[in-house]
Image: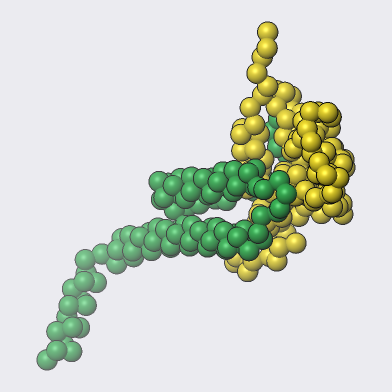
Amino acid sequence: MAPTGTSTSSSSTGSPSASASAASDQTMFLQLLVAQLENQDPLNPVDGTTFVTQLAEFQQLDTEISTGSDVSSILQDLNGLVAATGANTGAGNTGNNTGATGANAS
Amino acid sequence: MVASAAPSASSASAAAAPPTAQSVFGPNVWMTDPIGRNPDGSSFEYNPIYFATETTAQTVAQMVGGQVITENVFTQPAGQDPFVQQQPNYMVRMPNGAVINPGLVASFYTFGFPQSQIDTMIAQEAANTPPPAQTT
C-alpha cells in the first residue's frame, strides 16, 4: 500500500518545535493541493497559472524553512564557539581588555 | 515539465532532479483528447487529467500494490445516462478495495516536487478514498 519511491529526508539542526511546525505546514499544503486536484472540473483542466502561483508560494515556504534551520545551526555553532572561547581565555583576558580600553581613553 | 528551482547550496539532495510524469510513466501519461457525447450527439472534451493511459495505470498499480480496472467515472451505465463517455477511465483498485484515479496520481509529478512530497500526496490520495461499504 505504501507508495514507493526514493524518499529523501531532510536533516534539521533547528529547533525541534519549529521544524515540526514547518513540516506540519508542508503536509497541510500538500493535503490541500491533493484535495484541489481531486475536485477539478471534469471538463476543464485547472488553470495552470493558479498552480504556478501556489507552487511559488510553496517553494518560498520551503526556502524559509531551510533558512530557519540554517540560522538555528549557525546559532548553535556560535554558542559553542563562545563557550569554547570563554573556557580557553579565562578571567585574565577580561582584565587585559579593560586595561587596554582604559589606555585608549586616556 | 516544470523548470527546476535555484539550487540550494545547503542541501545535498537538491542535486538530484525531481521526477517528472514523463520520467516515471513514459511519454504518454494521459489519453489525448478524451471526449464524451451529449444527448444531441455532439461531442465535448473531458479534462484529460482524469484519463490515464493503461500504461500509467499499470505503473500506479505497481506503486500501491493494486490492480487496474476500467470504469466510466463520469457517467452512469449505458442506457441510464443521456451523456456517453467515449472511453472508460483506467482506475486502480487498491488492496483495501478503494479505487483511485491513476491520472490524478500522475499529475502529482508535474509540480517538480521531490519524491518524498509526492509520496505524501499519494498517501493523502489513498487516505481520501474510502474503501467500498460492506453490503453484508
What's the residue at 71%, 46% (across, down)?
A42
Q: Is residue B116 visible?
A: no
Residue A60 image point, x, y percent: 52, 62
What's the residue at 68%, 57% (across, down)?
B112
What's the residue at 18%, 73% (across, down)?
A95
What's the residue at 73%, 30% (across, down)?
B99
The hue in which chain A appears in the rendered picture of the protein: green
Question: Residue B82's quadrant in the figure?
Answer: top right
The total of numbered circles placed on residues is 0
Where is the C terminus of chain B found, in terms of image quarters?
top right
Residue at the bottom extreme of this rendering = A106
Question: Residue A47's quadrant in the figure?
Answer: bottom right
Residue B56 image point, x, y percent: 83, 43
The hue in which chain B appears in the rendered picture of the protein: yellow
Position above or below: A97 against B2: below
Q: Is residue A89 visible?
A: yes
